[in-house]
Image (tube, rainbow, N blue to C red):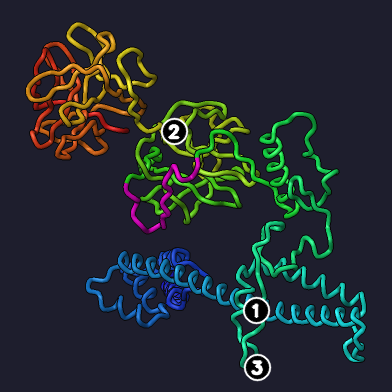
Amino acid sequence: MDLGDLMQLLDDTSNTTIRQRQVFFKTVKKKKETFDDYLTNLQNLASVCAFSEKNNMIRDVIILGIQDKKFRNELLSKPNLTLDKVISECRLKEAEDIKLEEKLKAKKLLLEAKKKEKDNVKEFQATLNELKQCLNQTSERIKGAPKPENQNMTKDQFKKALEQVKSTRVNMMASAPNIFEKINNEPSTKTNKTREKVEVINCQKCKTTHPRKCCPNFVSKPKFCINCKVVGHLNNECPNKTKGDNSKRNVNQQNSRHHQNTRHNIRGTSARVIPAGWNPPNQHVWQPKSPYSDIPPHSVHAGHDSDGDTIYVGRSNYNGDWLPAKVIPRKNTAYVCWGGQEIPVHTYDVLCGIGYSWQPGFAGTVPPGAVSAGATTSGEMLYVGRGHWQGSLTPGKIHPSHRCLYIPYGGQEVRLDSYEVLIRAPALTWMPSSGSMLPANAIHAGHDSDGDQIYVGRAYHDGDLLPAKVIFNKNCAYVCHGGNEHVKHQFEILCGTSYRWLPASNGHVPPNSVEGGRTSNGEQLYIGRGHHCGSLTPGKIHPSHQCLYIPYGGQEIRLSSYEVLTRM
């Protein structure tokens, strides 16, 4: 290659670089393009432009391409503006713009609905006036009054107007419950007098509100069953008609069920099937989260990704299904599995609360108390589970009818037959006892010096509600007060699951500690236990005294180091 060829090659390379830089500097964010997609496009273009300061060039192009002058000036006014700061600010601005756009859409829909409602009011009023005029004409004809030539209405026209009123009435009941109040309060357009009042009643026959003698169930004289109060059949055709000596209570129950079923059939809807084991939503707190907001406090930890990122329990709606999700705050997104694929989602909820634990499961089975994060469009409940896969501990959806757990991983929907199920243990409860029988799930506290097992209890003494040690082999409980140990034959024993003992000292208690009582002046007393003379004995943690007191050998023993009963 001679010098001329080399110079030609350099010119071609320089021209190519210039053209690539021209494309880079002319790149602007499209209207429906997300900022992350725009940023990725700029980074790809900058990688082939041979910039010495690539990040600064990307930063400058982003700022110059911002259409919002106010936002651009705010960025330029900030000192030490780096690419990372510009990216963070632009993402926050994009999230705010999305929220503002949603609010504007909602406001527009509300205005359209109000306008439509007002139009419906006018249309109904005109139809009602026409019906009144028709009724007056019919009444005059019956009385033999002369028939006006320009106000004739045939029988077919009358029926048509009647049907129109009925259909308008049904539509208006759904969209404007207070329609008649609006008509009554609206002034007449022809005179300054108020309109003639329309008497409105709460009809017990059709369970709606309408003018007197305008019941939609009776205008055309439909079949109506007095037995079960349902339109569609007569009394002698009622399938709930009882024979023999059936009690009135059974008849009412059957009629109620029949009425509900008939009502659903008339409306064309069916009741949703809720399988056994479904936890009502109000038992769990699902906190909405955006990709750039902090993880809520008390979020339920689910596991870890293969790269060590922490994963939390979440849920999201995808294609009409509410699906359990794995939430990875470090990646600013959540993932669900559906249709054999791992789907990233940016709108999701995070499960928050305490008292959750994981239990083994297999082949689609779930234990009592299993947490459901949603359901399929067919109504089948989906439960929260987790499983080990390629160095990760990943949450997913337990699909009972598929007899497995599905987890989102590596872009795919991975099937696992063995897994763990997220459950929420029932709350701790205090059961009355006299020492004769050990209740189920009684919380074990330790052992006495002679080997007798000790359980957690509480009892009243001298106006104080005190934590107690319960020994069923001795049929009694013991509390400590005023330096002495006192025997109690009437007490309560603590029952429940998902608890643990955590070390503490000097009157301190960790979060979620279990309260075992109160003094007469209102100070809280917590449940603790400590070692003394070969025993592991529970007692009362007195924060203001900075110690644990246990009843032992007729005395009140003071301990500075101890363990505290806490909820998991």
Return the disc, 3 or 2, that comes first in the chain's sequence. 3
Tell me residue 39's x, y (percent): 43, 66
Tell me residue 57's x, y (percent): 35, 72
User: What's the amino acid at mark 2?
Assistant: Ile
Residue occupied by mark 2? 423
User: What's the amino acid at mark 3?
Assistant: Thr
User: What's the amino acid at mark 1?
Assistant: Lys
Vertically, is 436 above or below 355?
above
Q: Quadrant of residue 174?
A: bottom right
Q: How many neighbours does mark 2 have within 10 angstroms: few (below 14), some (14-19), or many (20 or more)?
A: many
The residue sitting at 57% across, 27% down in the picture is: 363
Return the disc, 1 or 3, that comes first in the chain's sequence. 3
Helix, strand or loop under label 1: loop
Q: Quadrant of residue 139?
A: bottom right
User: Decide: marks 3, 2 in contact (CB < 8 A)?
Assistant: no
Q: Which residues, given as a range, are shown in magenta?
A: 280-297
